[in-house]
Image (cartoon, helix red, strand yellow):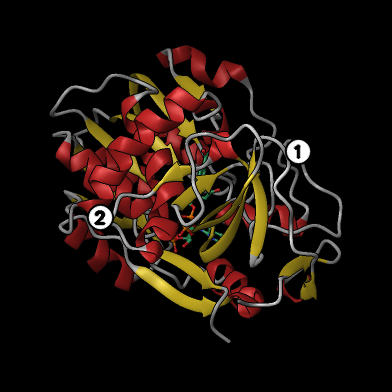
Amino acid sequence: MNPPYAIFVTSLGGPEVLQAGPIDMPVAGPGQVVIEHSAIAVNYVDIYLRAGQPHGHNPEPPFVPGISAVGRVLEVGAGVSDLQVGDRITYANAGVGCYCTHVAIPADRAVKVPAALDDIRVAAGLLRALTAQYLLKQMRPMAAGETVLVHAAAGGVGQLLVQWAKRLGLKVIATVGSDAKVITAHELGADAVINYRTQDFVAEVARITGGEGVSVVYDSVGHDTFTGSLACLAPKGLAINYGTASGHVENFSLQTLHARSLWVCRPTLRTYIAKRADLLAMCEEVFALLADKTIRLDIAALLPLLRAGKAHSLLESRSTQGAIVLLPATS
Ligand SMILES: NC(=O)c1ccc[n+]([C@@H]2O[C@H](COP(=O)([O-])OP(=O)(O)OC[C@H]3O[C@@H](n4cnc5c(N)ncnc54)[C@H](OP(=O)(O)O)[C@@H]3O)[C@@H](O)[C@H]2O)c1
């Protein structure tokens, strides 16, 4: 077993502020389980919090970043009846930092992983697929044949959104930031793909839809795209700003929505999985999706946990397609 250690955000800043340090072996308090991690997800929110981008509940340094991981139960606290030592579990948004070898989490945040799924695919996909689930299936009922716009479609969440939307019978217009990603978005099944670094995506969406616009925009880019996203909507359309990879949407006037009765929303997965019953129901659906080998989720990089800084540099560079996973047991 590894001597316990964690990666700390030592001060707010670039990837270099991520530094390893020893931790005490956690002890399971009442209602908790201690997990030994096997695979740790790198999500874009880890970057927002490391850099100090306001995100509702920013922790003060030093803190351990990371919100989703996979591991085995090492110890079960008093009052926990549905988990046993040795169970393979995963979690997202458990209120603890997960860039570490061992952690104690509330047992009611842990979900057992089906045998058909490997640790890396679950770490790469759990939080992203839960996000795609609520975005596509809970935010607004969609009828087959409706058209949606997915930004950053070759990214971790984007890959799953495109494929799931196609399974729901939607027409998908995808935007991506490089020619290599254009190829990926086509392979994922997008009906039309726009490189928004070289093409005017608003004009392209108007051309592709014959001026009708799209029913929903899934916008994880934020600052650089959101005004354009609104312009891509059909009357009564919905723009969902679910991420801020390019920065926050600022100086937004509600009057922008008036002329075409548009809707906007700025949701977070935390709300959708706050109740355990919802978490379990969504995980059941997400595990089935991830177990389907025809669903593609690229692993952009597999890195030792000690190289968390490299993982952040890669994700911020916009060069990755798919998800990055950190492995605590390798060096
Ligand atoms: N609200 C929620 O519930 C929720 C839950 C999970 C994730 N998210 C959000 O979902 C998004 C995707 O997360 P992910 O972890 O899978 O990341 P990702 O999509 O793999 O990576 C972010 C992508 O954003 C695009 N991008 C555009 N402008 C950028 C800029 N200025 N800097 C960096 N990237 C830029 C890049 O793709 P291109 O090169 O194609 O432009 C980049 O690859 C993030 O915004 C995250 O915050 C939200």
| Tag 2 and tag 1, C-beta contact below 8 Å | no
Q: Quadrant of the image for the N terminus?
A: bottom right
**Could you tell me how far apart the alpha carbons at marks 2 and 1 are, in whole angstroms?**
35 Å
Question: Which residue shows up at 32% across the image and 32% down it?
Answer: 136
- Residue tagged 2: 193
Q: Is residue 220 above or below residue 250?
A: below
Q: Which residue is pictured at 46% across the width and 73% down the height?
A: 319
Q: Position of residue 154 (x, y in %)?
A: 35, 60
Residue type, numbered disc 2: Val
Residue 31 vs residue 110: left or right? Answer: right
Q: Nearer the viewer, residue 136 or 89?
A: 89
Report x, y in % for residue 293. 17, 59
Disc 1 crowd rating (10 Å Cα; few below 14, some 14-19, many 20+) is few
Residue extending furthest toward the bottom: 331
Residue at (20, 51) in percent of width and height: 190
Where does residue 305 sit, x and y in percent of width and height? Answer: 60, 75
Hey, what amino acid is under mark 1?
His
Q: Secondary structure at mark 1?
A: loop
Q: Quadrant of the C terminus?
A: bottom right
Mark 2 element type: strand
Closest to the observer: 52 or 121? 121
Task: Give the residue number, with chain letter if any, for mark 1.
Answer: 57
Specify whether 114 is left or right of 145.
right
